[in-house]
Amino acid sequence: MEFKKKLRTRLYVAISYIILGAAMIATAELVDTAGAFLSSFGFAIIVMGLVRVWQYRRITKTEESIRAREIVETDERNLTIARRAAHAAFSIYILLGGCSVIALQIAQKQELSQMLAWSMCALVVFYWVSHWVIRKKI
Amino acid sequence: MDNRIKELRKQNGVTQDELALAVGVTRQTIISLESGRYNASLQLAHRIARYFDCAIEEIFIFGEDKYGI
C-alpha cells in the first residue's frame, strides 16, 4: 500500500511538471524579454512530465508489475550501487571542480571561477548538514 | 563471504527468479550473492534462511575476519 501511495505521489508530481511547463511556455509567449530559453525549457519539462505519466500507467497495469517495480526500487544491492555511485560522483565533482577553479583563475575568468568555487562550497556544506541530520536520526 | 544458496536452491528445485521474488530482491542480487560478489544484509540473510527453513549459519559460511573472530 505504501508503495502505491509513493507511485501516486509521483503521478501528481508529473502532472505538476506538465502544468509548470505549460506555464513557462505561456510566460515566454506573453513576456517579450523571456526569450526562447524559457519556452524550450518549459517544453522539456512537459515532455518529462508526460514520460513520468506514461511510466506510471505502465507500472500500475497489474499487481505483478507494481510488485516487480517495488522489488527493483527497494532491492538492497541496487540501493548500495546507487549510494556508492552518488559518493563516487560527489568525490569526482569535488576533484574536477577544484582543478577547474584553479584553471579558470589562471585563465583570468574570475567570475566563473568564483561561481564554481561557491557552488562547490555549498555542496560540501549540504553534505555535512545532511550527514549531521542523518546521524541524529539513526 | 561464502554461502550455500545455490546448493540449497538446486536441492529444493527453486529457480533464481522464484527465490528472488520470494525474498523481495532482484534476480541479479541472487546471482551476485551466489557468486560471492555481494554480501547480504542481516535482514536479507534472515529472509533467505526462513525461506529454506534453515539457520543463517547453515547457509552463510562465516570465515575468520580481520578481528580474528
Image (cartoon, rainbow, N blue to C red):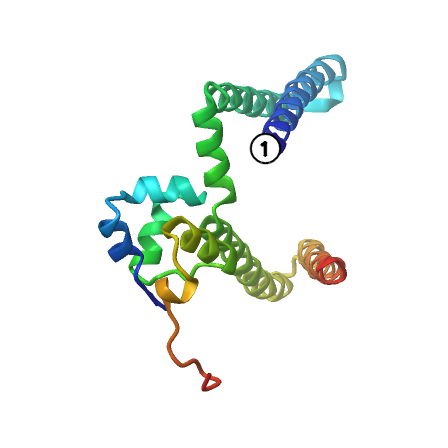
Q: Is residue B20 visible?
A: yes
Along the viewing direction, whichever of B19 and A41 lies nearer the viewer: B19
Give the side of residue A35 with respect to residue B5, left or right.
right
Q: Mark 1: give few (<14), some (14-19) or many (20+) Cα within 10 Å.
A: some
Name which residue type carries label 1: Phe
Give the side of residue A36 with respect to residue B13, left or right.
right
Residue B37 lies, with reference to residue A50, above or below; the image says below
Along the viewing direction, whichever of A61 and B54 lies nearer the viewer: B54
Residue drawn where x is 35% and y is 47% of the image: B28
Residue B33 lies, with reference to residue A35, above or below; the image says below
Query: Could you tell me which quadrant the N terminus of chain A lies in?
Result: top right
Residue A85 lies, with reference to residue B67, above or below; the image says above
Per the image, label 1 sits on a secondary structure element best described as helix
- The residue that label 1 is drawn on is A3
Residue drawn where x is 52% and y is 43% of the image: A74
Query: Could you tell me which quadrant the C terminus of chain A lies in?
Result: bottom right
Give the side of residue A15 with respect to residue A67, left or right.
right
Q: Residue furthest front?
A: B53
Q: Is residue B25 visible?
A: no
Quarter of the image holding residue B59?
Answer: bottom left
Residue drawn where x is 63% and y is 33% of the image: A2
- Residue A127, x across and y down, in percent: 69, 59
Quarter of the image holding residue A49?
Answer: top right
Along the viewing direction, whichever of A45 and B24 lies nearer the viewer: B24
Along the viewing direction, whichever of A131 and A122 lies nearer the viewer: A131
